[in-house]
Image (cartoon, rainbow, N blue to C red):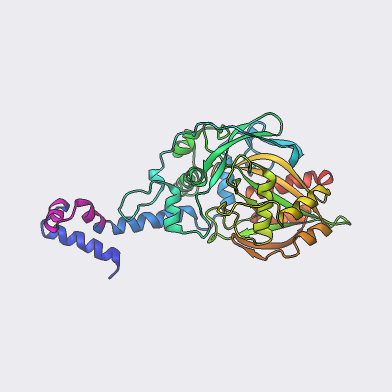
Amino acid sequence: MGRAHRRTGFATARKAAGHTRESLAAALGVDRTTVSTWESGEAIRRSREEWLRMRSPEGVRGRELSELAAWLYPEEVRAPGGHVLAGPGWLWDEPVPLDEVRLRWVEAAQPGALEVEHLVPLTDLGVPYRGYSRAVRDVVRPRLMENRPSYRLTEVGPGASFGFGMTAFFSVFDVKQAVAHEFKAAWAAGGREAPGWDELPVRRSIGMPFDPAALLMSPGISTLTIRRGRRGEHTFVLHERDSAKVADGGGLAHVLPAGEFQPATADPRADLSLWNTIMREFSEEFLGDPEHDGVDPVDYTRPPFTRFEAAKRRGRFRVSHYGLVMEPLELGAGQLTVAVVDGDTFDVLFADRVAVNDEGAVGRDVPFTDEAVRRLEPRLSGSALTLLRLALRDRRSLV
């Protein structure tokens, strides 16, 4: 007999014997919570099954739901193509050299917590999880999920400038996943029709999602890597993110490398560098190096970082920044960057490129053309598609 049937039978037997939960607890010398736990197995199982079903709605790709969520917002805050959002001053008209993007240390009070108990499953004690991240750790158990310090966006300044302070990965993850879960649940309950604001109280409480004082944001960095061919035969690389290995973003193809904006040394202020983060992601995702998680501080004076630096100084490894976008389903901010690496330099730097890394499969080189992107469009994440289209628009200046 299954565990759920045993617990259901237990409740039936208790009632047949004339016991309340309180009287049975007293007779057995346990507290009432213990009896409730014995009887709650079916409720726990159902809550987890429903929660998992909402996390990955059958037959619907994440980008389609994300684009439905984008329609909730005015057209003027949708980025070109309508796949992602962009607040005032977030997305720049042309790519800016990475070295010209200015970062400042600006601490600020954290926004208030969201009420999300109705969006998480039950623990083994029959009560809701206290946070979405803890539920994912216990129920989904992804291979990569750590509560590391993360840089928190606190200010979008004039020109190419940002203010950053500190937060934790789980704090941001909890917000993004709860907002996405609410939308998926409302969409499913409404017969797979786009929900309205009245059905989305958590999202409605956030309002327009571009104020760092009102919404906790830690904008990761997505880098489109272009191998510059001598005769114009430019290519780029895609990443097939594995849902079993990553906490979110699985099942879609994304640009490579991409990762959280986090420190990897003992001094977060000294490591507040877009270039340092991008180099670490190249090391991990292209070369298969272990995660630079900060346990052993990164030494940027050693390979492969010194090789990346040398190529950058020679002008053979050029990185540009497009600004910020917002993924509509999760309301997760992200930075869009492009790395253009001369072909011979690319072949040397990434001679040992891996086929599979800790987050999924590294795809083959794809022609950097409009036709190739059109063919790939159904499989691409919204931010990857937006970045590719911007880069194709600006291909003359980039490559």
- 338 relative position to 154: left or right: right
Q: Residue 130: tell me if it is visible.
A: yes
Q: Position of residue 306 (x, y in %)?
A: 74, 53
Question: Quarter of the image containing the N terminus?
Answer: bottom left
Seen in the picture, residue 7 relative to 257 is either above or below; the reply is below
Measuring from the top left, give residue 351's x and y in whole percent. Answer: 76, 64
Q: Is residue 226 or residue 373 the one in the foreground?
A: 226
In reply to whether residue 31 is colored magenta, the answer given is: yes
Residue 374 in the image: x percent, y percent? 72, 53
Quarter residue 117 falls in: top left
Which residue is pictured at 16% across the width and 62% down the height? 13
In reply to whether residue 181 is colored magenta, the answer given is no
Quick one: which residue is furthest to the top in this view? Answer: 158
**Residue 138, quarter of the rendered image:** bottom left
Nearer-the-camera pick, 124 or 162 = 162
Question: Looking at the picture, does residue 110 appear above or below residue 277?
Answer: above
Q: Main secondary structure of the magenta part?
A: helix
**Circle count:** 0
Q: Residue furthest right?
A: 231
Q: Which span is picked out in magenta?
A: 22-37
Camera-side residue of 303 and 217:
303
Left or right: 231 with respect to 71?
A: right
User: With 175 as the anchor, is 303 left or right in this view?
Assistant: right
Above or below residue 188? Residue 160 is above
Question: In the displayed structure, does residue 291 sit left or right of residue 364?
Answer: left
